[in-house]
């Protein structure tokens, strides 16, 4: 029996993941908040706001009514920004089948509660943690939409459930792996956005590959330290949800966080950089505060995250970033 998917969120990644599922042979309904987006997908087979020029499968159903999207859905893909997940899910929870699998595409840590997205999902819905899966990896939406080869990782404490999702989204261009370390995968996805902001700032300031290589490597060390403190497997950060996603997000011009950071490095204020994104969310901006607070709570040192938080929220000048990081006390690498 085929699994029926509802994908809630028609941004670039939600739309592309819906396409992947359809291409893999799954039955999928995509929910869009705005009716005109749902109609464009249905009538023109295109999401002009987020993926202009990309032809979407004819079998992809779209709607702006969450009741229609969730009716009979066996698996629900949550593709809304991390900071709005709780609000949206509270409105949807009564429409979701109690036994459904919930799949998070959001990458962030919730402000205030400092909860990971899987924790928000179980808290709001009351379902078991074994019903929640997380998808992460080097998954730049535009490249996947163009069917360029990529891999991802599906994390779920229920291995069989992860395998079922894996089978439902495997295509000739999209290769998913499975893992049970939900904590590590979620923290990798959230933290890499913050490190990508720092790399964007460095590029905007005119720094080259040595600086970017340093930020990526030391950023990976920050991610792993926090992950271990919260019970993650350190090896997870050497995989797709750690190093793989980190490299792609820090280096690609398709990365919203990288581009946002680059604008800051060139002298724009956070408000000016946000205005230039045309509605696209750079998750690392808000997550930098939550991750910083999470690190402080657990006594984990994250100097790059600290600097990014100060630039985005305290008026710190990106030009002082290098001096602040290089001027720290010297110590062994490990």
Image: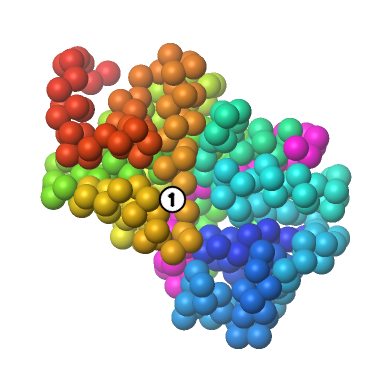
Q: Residue at x 55, y 53 (%)?
A: 176
Name which quarter of the figure residue 143 lies in: bottom left
Residue toward you, 124 or 316: 316
Q: Residue furthest bottom?
A: 44
x, y (%) of residue 149? 43, 64
x, y (%) of residue 178? 58, 44
**Residue 152 vertical position relative to residue 317 in the rendered view, above or below:** below
Name which quarter of the figure residue 69 lies in: bottom right
Is residue 310 rendered to the left or right of residue 292?
A: left
Quadrant in which the C terminus is drawn:
top left
Residue toward you, 58 or 69: 69
x, y (%) of residue 216? 28, 39
Q: Is residue 126 magenta?
A: yes
Q: Is residue 122 magenta?
A: no
Q: Is residue 93 visible?
A: yes
Is residue 243 rendered to the left or right of residue 227?
A: left
x, y (%) of residue 66? 77, 61
Numbered range of the magenta stretch = 124-148
Q: Residue at x 54, y 21 (%)?
A: 231
Q: Residue at x 53, y 60 (%)?
A: 13
Is residue 44 rendered to the left or right of residue 240?
A: right
**Residue 216 vertical position relative to residue 50 in the rendered view, above or below:** above
Question: How many labels, in total?
Answer: 1
Element type at mark 1: loop
**Residue 143 vertical position relative to residue 55 in the rendered view, above or below:** above
Quadrant in which the N terminus is drawn:
bottom right
Q: Is residue 213 visible?
A: no
Q: How is the image coloured?
A: rainbow
The residue carrying mark 1 is 282
Q: Residue at x 77, y 49 (%)?
A: 91
Residue toward you, 15 or 146: 15
Crowdedness near tag 1: few (<14), some (14–19) or many (≥20) residues, C-alpha within 10 Å:
many
């Amino acid at each position: 029996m085929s699994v029926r998917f509802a994908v809630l969120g028609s941004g670039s990644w939600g739309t592309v993941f819906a396409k992947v599922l359809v291409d893999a042979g799954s039955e999928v309904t995509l929910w869009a908040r705005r009716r005109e987006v749902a109609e464009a997908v249905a009538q023109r087979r295109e999401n002009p706001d987020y993926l202009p020029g990309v032809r979407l499968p004819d079998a992809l159903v779209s709607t702006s009514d969450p009741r229609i999207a969730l009716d009979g859905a066996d698996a629900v893909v949550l593709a809304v920004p991390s900071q709005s997940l709780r609000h949206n899910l509270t409105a949807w929870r009564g429409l979701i089948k109690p036994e459904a699998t919930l799949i998070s595409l959001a990458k962030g840590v919730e402000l205030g509660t400092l909860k990971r997205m899987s924790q928000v999902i179980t808290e709001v819905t009351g379902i078991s943690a074994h019903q929640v899966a997380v998808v992460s990896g080097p998954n730049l939406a535009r490249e996947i939409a163009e069917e360029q080869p990529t891999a991802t990782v599906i994390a779920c404490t229920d291995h069989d459930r992860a395998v079922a999702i894996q089978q439902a989204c495997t295509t000739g261009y999209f290769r998913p792996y499975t893992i049970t370390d939900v904590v590590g995968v979620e923290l990798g996805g959230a933290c890499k956005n913050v490190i990508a902001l720092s790399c964007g700032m460095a590029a905007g300031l005119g720094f080259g590959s040595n600086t970017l290589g340093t930020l990526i490597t030391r950023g990976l060390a920050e991610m792993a330290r926090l992950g271990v403190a919260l019970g993650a497997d350190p090896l997870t950060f050497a995989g797709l949800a750690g190093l793989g996603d980190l490299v792609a997000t820090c280096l690609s011009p398709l990365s919203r966080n990288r581009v946002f950071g680059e604008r800051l490095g060139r002298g724009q204020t956070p408000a000016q950089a946000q205005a230039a994104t045309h509605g696209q969310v750079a998750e690392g901006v808000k997550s930098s505060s939550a991750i910083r607070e999470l690190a402080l709570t657990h006594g984990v040192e994250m100097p790059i995250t600290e600097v990014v938080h100060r630039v985005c929220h305290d008026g710190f000048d990106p030009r002082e970033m290098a001096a602040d990081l290089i001027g720290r006390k010297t110590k062994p690498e490990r």
